[in-house]
Amino acid sequence: MNKKRAAGFGFILGFALCVSAAERPNMIVILCDDLGHGDLSCYGHPIIKTPNLDNLAATGLRFTDCYAAAAVCSPSRAGLFTGRNPNRAGIYDWIGGGPVHLRKSETTVAELLKTAGYTTMLSGKWHLNGHFNQPEKQPTPGDHGFDYWFATANNASPSHNNPKNFIRNGKKVGPIEGYSSSIVVKEALGWMKNRKAKDKPFAVFLTFHEPHQPIASPPDLVAKYKPFETIPGQATYWANVAQVDRAVGKLLKGLDDQKIRENTLIIFTADNGPEEWMRYPGVWNSHGTPGKVNGIPLRGWKLDVFEGGIRVCGIVNWPAQIKTSRVVKEPICGVDILPTLCDVAKAPIPENLHLDGTSILPLILGGDSLKRETPLFWFYYNARGYANFAMREGDYMLVTRRTGPLYHAGTPYSPDRYPGISEATIRAPELYNLRTDPMEVSDLSKKQPERLQSMVAKLNHIFNELKKTAPSWQEKK
């Protein structure tokens, strides 16, 4: 840790020790993988039943305009853990190996919460290392502030059923019986029950593999949905989402059994939109849905910066504080999780930490709006559709293309692609009003030129500033 960060952390620790741990809640963040905005029954799915998540929403907050930090997995996780647009950290795409990783110089939410007296735990998918569990090459989750970690590099292997690739605090676990999300929850509940620092509040990050490929679902749930299947693989996918709900039910029961449910803040969301059916042969049983708004389908899928690729489910539940359930339309994002948890934990954030998110605690406590210093924005150099940039301001979404070479969508970043980022400029802007046009089909750029010009100028400023520190990952010879 450099001296500037160390000094900042020392100040935080001194401040945090003045706050009674008993006043602060335990916190659990649940992140699903490739779960569509419309995949839960409380978000309008006509077939999938998700009673546990529906109950969390019915007794908490359900966000209609919740966004992932990115349109693909590794960048989205980097955004969640750092509170910053993932391009700032050089996480430009999903990590397939090599030099790309979440650098130790990045400050994570786990590190900040530890300075405030929290114990921290990660259980599930990590996917922020090109060389996973090789501490001599790249930092592990333990180096990023997690006191305890139980994780896989990328997907559960060989599938969600009986995975063999979990690592616990740097040591291989071997084959485990059960389904991934339930295994992840069981590990977390065991840690909560047996942890030594019972006098400290905890922050747990449950990063489910479901419903990402390779999909495997419990036979009893598949049988339940088989009568509704019209395309092969639908029942398996629907059952996979239901398995997520089953795992959440086990989590809630475990919290009740340990008598810690009341003052536990739970945030449930996803890392990006759903995988498109048959985008490649291996996803023949991916049947997620981007969802609808007022009966109008959202445009795009995973790998898109259109709504279907970045708008996800968002549920917040905290019995001790949220006494009246609400549906909230104010836009929020994965980059808001770090400042929110730090706000709840009374953990000050170093002034030199350039965040793109903002705390949503005012919404949790009953407010209906947020004031953002930086508009929500996305840049994905290798997007599936023609658009690479998106920026939301109020009800309006600016969507633009980029200049430069094109690459095959779905393939990971390599250093030779850096010019497609460092030399990119904004071109062909489009403007949409998401309240009246959630499908993003009625371009308002010619009808509202002043708004378009203003938003393009802001996005240009943000992107040019971002590129100054975005690393190339060119390995030294």
Image: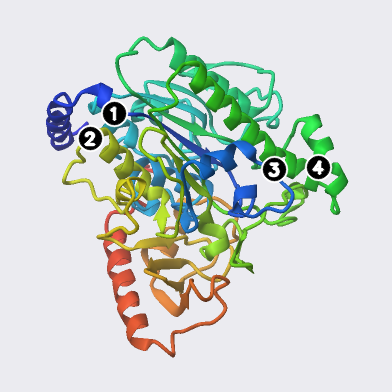
Location of mark 1 (residue):
24
Kindly indicate whether the residue at mark 3 contacts the one at mark 2 (C-beta within 8 angstroms): no
Residue 225 image label: 4
- Label ID, residue 49: 3
Mark 3 is on which residue type? Lys
Residue drawn at point x = 39 percent, y = 62 percent: 377
Front: mark 2 or 3: 3
Q: Nearer the viewer, residue 181 or 292?
A: 292
Which residue appears at 67% of the width and 34% of the height? 243
Q: Which residue is mark 2?
A: 346
Q: N-terminal of the two: label 2 or label 4?
A: 4
Mark-to-mark CA distance, 2 and 3: 37 Å
Residues at circles 2 and 4 in contact by the CB criterion of under 8 Å? no
Q: Position of residue 328 (x, y in %)?
A: 44, 55
Instruction: Name which residue type carries label 4.
Output: Tyr
Q: Is residue 426 above or below residue 116?
A: below
| Number of other residues with Cα within 10 Å of mark 2, as a class: few under 14, some 14 to 19, many 20 or more | many
Report x, y in % for residue 259. 45, 18
From this view, report whether residue 151 is shown above or below residue 299: above
